[in-house]
Amino acid sequence: MKSPEALADHELLNLIRSDDRAAFNEIYTRYWQTLYAVAYNRLRDRQKSEDVVHDVFSSLWSNRHQSEIRNLAAYLATAVKFRVLEYIRKEFFKQIYIQHISHLNPSESHDISEALHYKRLLQAINEEVENLPERCKLVFKYSREENKPLKQIASKMNLSTSTVENHLNRALKRLKEVVRKLGGQILSVLLLVIA
């Protein structure tokens, strides 16, 4: 048998489907630096870029039995770009939230009541998430808290992608209802975050 360094990408992919760690290590060695450069080019942060690349390789290993990758280099580069965009999206919403909160002046009673209202709203959303049916709750948490794509959630839970999408839509519909009932000035920000 050839050493992993001498194997083509498609041969390495076949080996990692058979749980071959040496093949996985070769893929990691072969592509880590390039993927890190792609992430760093966008994020300009060493640790965040390393985290993105680590997440992509972790996902590759976790989904090795289900993956149908035809072009490994393109797949990995796309996965890194997707993770980077997801990170940027999260940071964007975090900044919106920080800007909104920074405009709250605790010395004014109106702003204090708004902050309390926001806290109650978040608490109601968290309670509603916990009251979702188990599969629906898991799908929501995988999607929104762990940022897993629908296909990965479907694979992990042994469900079809359409079933996962239905669970996610059901969860979002219920959470949007909670937000609408409690309303307030921060409604639009919260709808952006949970939608």
Image: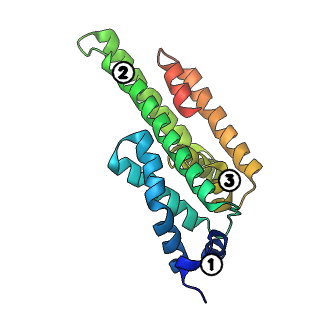
Residue 119 in percent (x, y) is at 39, 28
Circle number at residue 15: 1
Mark 2 or mark 1, which has the lower sequence index? 1
Kind of element beneath mark 3: helix
Q: Residue at x 57, y 22 (%)?
A: 181
Q: Is residue 132 above or below residue 27?
A: above
**Residue at mark 3 to residue at mark 2: CA–CA distance:** 34 Å
Circle number at residue 122: none
Disc 3 target residue? 151
Instruction: Report the colour scheme.
Output: rainbow
Residue 189 in percent (x, y) is at 50, 23
Residue 79 in percent (x, y) is at 57, 51
Residue 117 in percent (x, y) is at 41, 21
Q: Are marks 3 and 2 in contact (CB under 8 Å)?
A: no
Disc 2 target residue? 99
**Residue at mark 3 to residue at mark 1: CA–CA distance:** 22 Å
Query: Considering depth in this image, is 63 or 97 the residue closer to the camera?
Result: 63
